[in-house]
Image (spheres, rainbow, N blue to C red):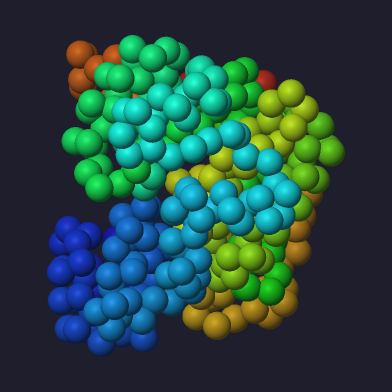
Amino acid sequence: STDFDTSDRLYFEPLTLEDVINIYRLEKPLGVIVQFGGQTPLNIAEDLEKAGVKILGTSVDSIDIASDRGRFREMMQEFGIPMPESGTAESLDEAMVVAERIGYPIIIRPSYVLGGRGMEIVHDEASLRRYISNAVKVMPGRPVLIERYLENAIETEADALSDGEEVIIPAVMEHIEFAGVHSGDAACVLPPVSIPQKHIDTIEKYTRQIAMELKVVGLMNVQYAICDDIVYVIEANPRASRTVPIVSKVCGIPMAKLATRLITGKKLKDLNLRKRRIPHFGVKESVFPFSMFPDVDPVLRPEMKSTGEVLGIAGSFDLAFWKAQEA
């Protein structure tokens, strides 16, 4: 946003409904792109549209399907795409029934989350009671989602560009930490180093299906976990993820620029974009401010703690990983 050749005007205002509407009325733009600001713009997209703001790219309803775990699960069941067993609860009694059906350990989170806030892996009933008593403070009026925690699973993710008719997936990323660590905190490598080709093909197939069904126009990120030789979908976000700059650099594809052209009406065939073989490895490693916050627990969990990331690129995975650690 601060690059001299990117924006004509820059506003230092909070991402609230009122502030965005005020700027929209002042600037009178063609519309608003909500895909480049993390989860916050997606959360206010529906209210913006109701206020008369034109949302460019993926529709508000598609954004809601991806954000609402219940609606998203229904969509996955229609396609026969596996997701970890889950249920929703609005009280302790409901939560205990769901947890008993699924079996511990479980991963529990508010239905709409930001940066993994309020997410926790729960191993027993006592921990569940403690979580539910605090969950109301996290996001009142929203049910919590309870999901089977896939132990020792390999987490992967895919960033995709879509024009609503065609989908391109530049690369699949493999997380180095096991599933259960927030994706923003995990190191990851692309192309993958230990995932069989059959699973990569499955991930690309599922990503295309989800993008087409949601009629994604622009960017989408889908997170997966591979457990007991099965590829499970964890969640889909119809927006740019924090890995977009990494994918752009490693694959040599300016994803944000291309997504903006798709959002403003171009088609993938107009952009002459082809998937290419990546002749090197890129490793993303997260940066943690533990030296600034000595009392923060350094153990990585579902709630995000990192404040940035670095990238190591080399001809071999080992060297790329070393460069990322050094950085």
Q: Nearer the viewer, residue 310 or 84?
A: 84
In this view, 147 is above or below 252: above
**Residue 258 visible in rendering:** no
Residue drawn at x 20%, y 75% as measured from the top left: 21
How far across and down, in percent of the image, does residue 214 sit? 58, 65
In this view, 230 is above or below 205: above
Q: Nearer the viewer, residue 113 or 258?
A: 113
Residue drawn at x 75%, y 58% as measured from the top left: 275
Residue drawn at x 54%, y 26% as measured from the top left: 101
In this view, 167 is above or below 207: below
How far across and down, in percent of the image, does residue 6 sit? 37, 69
How far across and down, in percent of the image, does residue 154 sit? 64, 26
Q: Is residue 21 left or right of residue 298?
A: left
Q: Quadrant of residue 301?
A: top left
Quarter placement of the C terminus: top left
In this view, 251 is above or below 92: below
Q: Looking at the image, which residue sits at the far right?
A: 198
Q: Is residue 278 left or right of residue 22?
A: right
Q: Nearer the viewer, residue 151 or 19?
A: 151
Q: Quadrant of residue 7?
A: bottom left
How far across and down, in percent of the image, does residue 197 sit? 83, 37
Q: Quadrant of residue 124?
A: top left
Residue drawn at x 76%, y 52% as measured from the top left: 205
Q: Nearer the viewer, residue 187 or 34?
A: 34
Quarter placement of the N terminus: bottom left
**Residue 135 visible in rendering:** yes
